[in-house]
Each structure stands twice: as C-alpha cells, then as structure tokens.
C-alpha cells in the first residue's frame, strides 16, 4: 500500500471526501448501499460498539495509527455517543472525527 495517496497524508494532505453527518433509513436502504457513494455496500453494525444500526447512522473520518502508518478510517456509527467514544486521532492530523469535504482545514503538509 502506498500511503502517499491516502486522504489526509501528512506530506500532501489530499482532501477527504465529504460525508453526510447523519443518514436515516428513510433516505437509503442500509443493506444496499452504493460503495462509490458510501464507501461500503451495507451498514449493519456500528464500527464502534458493534451494535445494530437501525433508523440512522453517522459516517465520520478519523486518522489513526495502524501498525507503522497513519491511515484514514471511515467510521459507520450508530449514534452521536459512539462518534464521541472514538479515540483521539493521531497527533499532527485533524484533531477530531470529521465529515470531510472542501471546508475541512487540515494541518500544514509535512512534519
């Protein structure tokens, strides 16, 4: 894997795709999502508590250390409480979970 092209990479800071803050089951079928839009083909359980996702879900980005690399992770959370329970993002990256998009100001490139 090349970390140079990852969203939020510390050298070039490519932008994170914009996510919806909250999506309800009235808007989309959680079992039949378009991966090009949602990053997955279904959301059944919460990425944080592993509980069922019913009624609505929240998608956020978080930058986290995985082995020796900092990776952008897409979180599918069942509630605002689960988003709040996420660990602190890795130092030098966006300091909170976020929904991406062009208005997100990332720390300066490079370290």
Image (cartoon, rainbow, N blue to C red):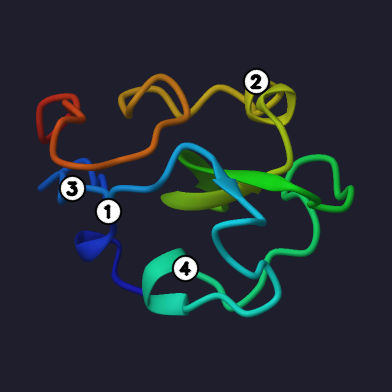
Q: Quadrant where the N terminus lies?
A: bottom left
- CB contact under 8 Å: marks 1 and 3: yes
Q: Is residue 33 left or right of residue 95?
A: right
Label 2 and label 4: CA atoms lie apart by: 21 Å
Q: Local crowd at mark 2 within 10 Å, few (<14), some, or many (≥20)?
A: few
Residue 27: which quarter of the image? bottom right
Q: Is residue 17 left or right of residue 102?
A: right
Mark 3 lies on a secondary structure that is: loop
Q: Which residue is mark 2?
A: 84
Label 1 and label 4: CA atoms lie apart by: 10 Å
Label 4 and label 3: CA atoms lie apart by: 15 Å
Q: Which residue is mark 3?
A: 15
Q: Residue at x 21, y 41 (%)?
A: 10
Q: Which residue is mark 4?
A: 39
Q: Is residue 108 positioned above or below 15 on the image?
A: above
Q: Residue at x 69, y 64 (%)?
A: 43
Q: Is residue 73 left or right of residue 94?
A: right
Q: Residue at x 89, y 48 (%)?
A: 51
Q: Which residue is mark 1?
A: 17
Q: Is residue 23 positioned above or below 62 on the image?
A: below
- CB contact under 8 Å: marks 4 and 3: no
Total residue callouts: 4
Label 1 and label 2: CA atoms lie apart by: 21 Å
């Amino acid at each position: 894997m090349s970390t140079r092209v990852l969203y939020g990479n510390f050298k070039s800071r490519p932008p994170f795709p914009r996510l919806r803050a909250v999506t309800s089951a009235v808007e989309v079928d959680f079992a039949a999502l378009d991966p090009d839009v949602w990053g997955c083909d279904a959301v059944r359980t919460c990425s944080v508590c592993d509980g069922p996702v019913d009624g609505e879900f929240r998608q956020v980005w978080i930058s986290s250390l995985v082995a020796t690399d900092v990776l952008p992770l897409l979180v599918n959370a069942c509630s605002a409480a689960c988003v709040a329970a996420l660990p602190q993002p890795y130092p030098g990256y966006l300091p909170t979970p976020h929904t991406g998009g062009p208005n997100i100001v990332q720390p300066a490139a490079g370290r």
